[in-house]
Image (tube, grey):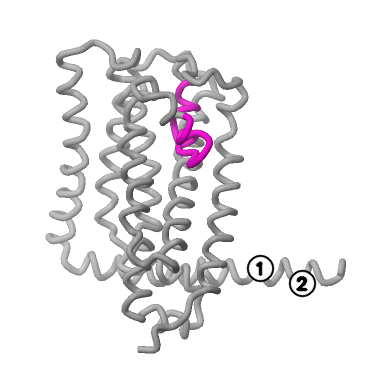
Amino acid sequence: MASERPGVLRGRAAAVAQGVSAYGLIVRMWVRSSLAYRTSFVMMACGNFAANALDFVAIMLMFSQIDALGGFSLPEVAFLYGTSGIALGLADLLLGSIEGLGRRVRDGTLDTLLLRPAPVFAQIAADRFALRRLGRVTQALLVLGWSLPRIEVDWTVGRVLMVPLMAVCGTAIFGAVFTAGAAFQFWAQDAAEVQNSFTYGGNAMLQYPPTVFAKELVRGVTFLVPLAFVNWLPALRLLGHPDPLGLPGWVDFLGPVVAALMCAGAGLAWRRGLRSYRSTGS
């Protein structure tokens, strides 16, 4: 058994490398297709940017009438908005196309992907890769950049590193939710909106302080679908706000662990869903 384990690990590493390579090739094809019509691409990217910017405009209008929201100032809410938006934007850019799996299951086009010599997950995730989604990421980056010099934080090396770590962990967590939601569509083909309620709906919630929500909801996004680890818990630590749930301080640093566990669970759900798939026969 011990002698077989290195071979198994090499096989898995080779499969991952093949998937990454296939994903990259498909992405490059769609990027070239998008850039073939540059004016159209720029207009769609700007439209994506503007549509998401309206959310922050609404927050600014709110703060024109109040000084704080749930104990958070405008720069602090902007920090929440930016970190959540970057995480969802990157996950949506990399894996957003996977939400269309239910349609492929219904119309039988998933069978075509199964016949190709590339991992199905890589093919679906990269399918119709929309570079215009960078508009959401760019807009969130600008809001985050505006907030950083305005929040009252004694910046140290560790605190500076927390910001990009939040983006990486948040992207992984949202990516796991995208993947788990897509896996569920192997059994419930019309479940894309359920998935969206946890991704886009979760992002809308994470843009605001946890103190404005009921504790039951905060518990739900901490222990059931742990979106709170995207930005709420690390932001509370960084900004010096108390945890509304009174959790131990070390919980704020569990983002990487939660992201790894969620990705592992989503991977298992995906493999189980793919094994359960039965062709439509069409």
| Residue at the image position 33 percent from the left and 16 percent from the top | 70
- Separation (CA) of disc 1 from disc 2: 9 Å
Q: Is residue 209 left or right of residue 275?
A: left
Task: Quickly name the residue at label 2.
Answer: 7
Q: Which type of secondary structure does the marked residue at label 1 adopt?
A: helix
Q: Earlier in the sequence, mark 1 or mark 2?
A: 2
Q: Nearer the viewer, residue 117 or 1?
A: 1
Is the magenta region chiefly helix, strand or loop?
helix
| Residue at the image position 25 percent from the left and 47 percent from the top | 135
Is residue 201 depicted above or below 100 in this figure? above
Instruction: Single out the residue that lies furthest toward the top.
Output: 67
Residue 3 figure quarter: bottom right
Residue stretch in magenta = 219-236
What is the crowding at mark 2: few (fewer than 14 residues within 10 Å), some, or many (at least 20)? Answer: few
Task: Quickly name the residue at label 1.
Answer: 12
Residue 246 figure quarter: top right
Identified by mark 1, the residue type is: Arg
- On-image quarter of the N terminus: bottom right
How far across and how far down the image is residue 28, in percent? 36, 68
Residue 99 figure quarter: bottom left
Q: Is residue 267 left or right of residue 236?
A: right
Whether residue 260 is in magenta: the answer is no
Is residue 277 depicted above or below 150 in this figure? below
Whether residue 230 is in magenta: the answer is yes
In the picture, the disc for residue 60 is: none
